[in-house]
Amino acid sequence: MSVERTYQDINERIKKGKAVVLTAEEVISKVKEKGVTRTAQEVDVVTTGTFGPMCSSGVFLNFGHSAPRIKMQKVWLNNVPAYSGIAAVDAYLGVTELPEDDPLNSNYPGEFRYGGGHVIEELVARKPIKLKATSYGTDCYPRREIETTITLDEINEAILFNPRNCYQNYNCAVNLGDRTIYTYMGTLKPRLGNANYSTSGQLSPLLKDPHFKTIGIGTRIFLGGGMGYVVWNGTQHFPGTLKDGNNRDLCGAGGTLSVMGDLKQMSPRWLVGTSFRGYGATLTVGVGLPIPILNEEILYYAAKTDEELYAPIVDYSDAYPNRKPGNLGLVSYAELKKGTIRIMDKEVPTGPLSSYPRAREIAHILKEWIEKGDFLLGEPSQLLPGPAAGLSGKPLNEKE
């Protein structure tokens, strides 16, 4: 008997404490045991998780008014600049922003760089943050400068708003060059000295719904330890599929999410300031999505295993990204997680930038929230574009 559920059906079962919820790992075992049709009849929701660096992130802050009032033209938080061209006491702090005295032009790669992501972690940890702001002064906002200390609970609002999170899939990065290079994919050793990747594979939210059949505006999610929402597709949302040598679809490729939530609900365990040597600062973010099992097709993809999900191997030397993605082939997440892969007849050690154990923990937390009735599914008012939408993108330097 085929399964057809609605969000209302599942939410009613959640309210009554009768919903059957499995993590993306757990549902794999169940499908192997009982098959897709039987499992779809029994399972209402599959939970996913990812915990990795997400550079396109930041927080909107409203500080409240001082006496006398100031129209903040320039703002610094722990000496890290925030963008203040919004309103009098609003600012947006991006996670990759660095202090103005950071030695950006130094040839030495540097071991650690403090940036916006670290400020956000300290805010959510309820640590005091030094706020400095300057202004040109107006009749209604006469004050020209302020220096004070703030904490998260003292300011009016703090809204985590991340324009691009949860890359559906990402590269396995290697370096074919003759020198070590420092990238947002970590340190890459020369001559295939290592291979780094940053996707949780069979727990990865957008790999478990590759056609965006359940993800859209209003989808309720786990975000940074609190409850958040998908508010739009992420920037650089170019959904597609990786294909094998016979042009068959293997798995999703380039979807992204724009997400937001109340920073005051979140936790420094799931928002961690991060520094990459020679690259700069970012924020490691925990995100989890519930996949409602509306029908068998949705379950089929939600139960995909690491053996069935692939990443393109990309050389980051020689002016990346001018080389074509996947120029060194594809590799399954099962192979990556074994610790070594074979490239060009060489055994290459692999290393994750994202944490699979923490992704598993997110999936379990989200499962518990749903089972307790604390988390109802948010039915999207509009689904995000899937691979059939035909979206495409071009590098900035590509000519028509």
Image (tube, rainbow, N blue to C red):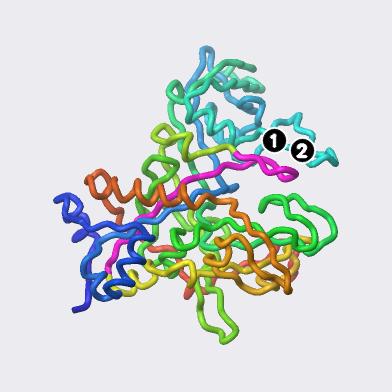
Determine the residue positioned at 53% across, 71% down: 240
**Image: magenta residue range:** 274-294
Q: Is residue 86 visible?
A: yes
Which secondary structure, mark 1?
Answer: loop
- Above-or-below relation of 104 to 323: above
The residues tagged by marks 2 and 1 sit, at their Cα atoms, a distance apart of 7 Å
> What amino acid type should be assigned to the residue bearing mark 1?
Arg
Is 114 situated left or right of 199 in this image?
A: right
- Residue 242 placement: quadrant: bottom right
Q: Which residue is mark 1?
A: 113
Q: Which corner quadrant holds the N terminus?
A: bottom left
**Image location of residue 100, percent across then percent down:** 73, 31
Check the image and name the residue furthest to the bottom: 246
Q: Which corner quadrant holds the C terminus?
A: bottom right
Is 39 situated left or right of 204 in this image?
A: left
**Image location of residue 319, percent across then percent down:** 79, 61
Judge by depth and name the residue closer to the eye, 381 or 170: 170
Judge by depth and name the residue closer to the eye, 202 or 135: 202
- Residue 148 placement: quadrant: top right
Determine the residue positioned at 42% across, 69% down: 304
The crowding category of the residue bearing disc 2, from other C-alpha atoms within 10 Å (few below 14, some 14 to 19, many at least 20), is some
> What amino acid type should be assigned to the residue bearing mark 2?
Gly
Check the image and name the residue furthest to the left: 16
Q: Which residue is mark 2?
A: 110
Judge by depth and name the residue closer to the eye, 362 or 387: 362
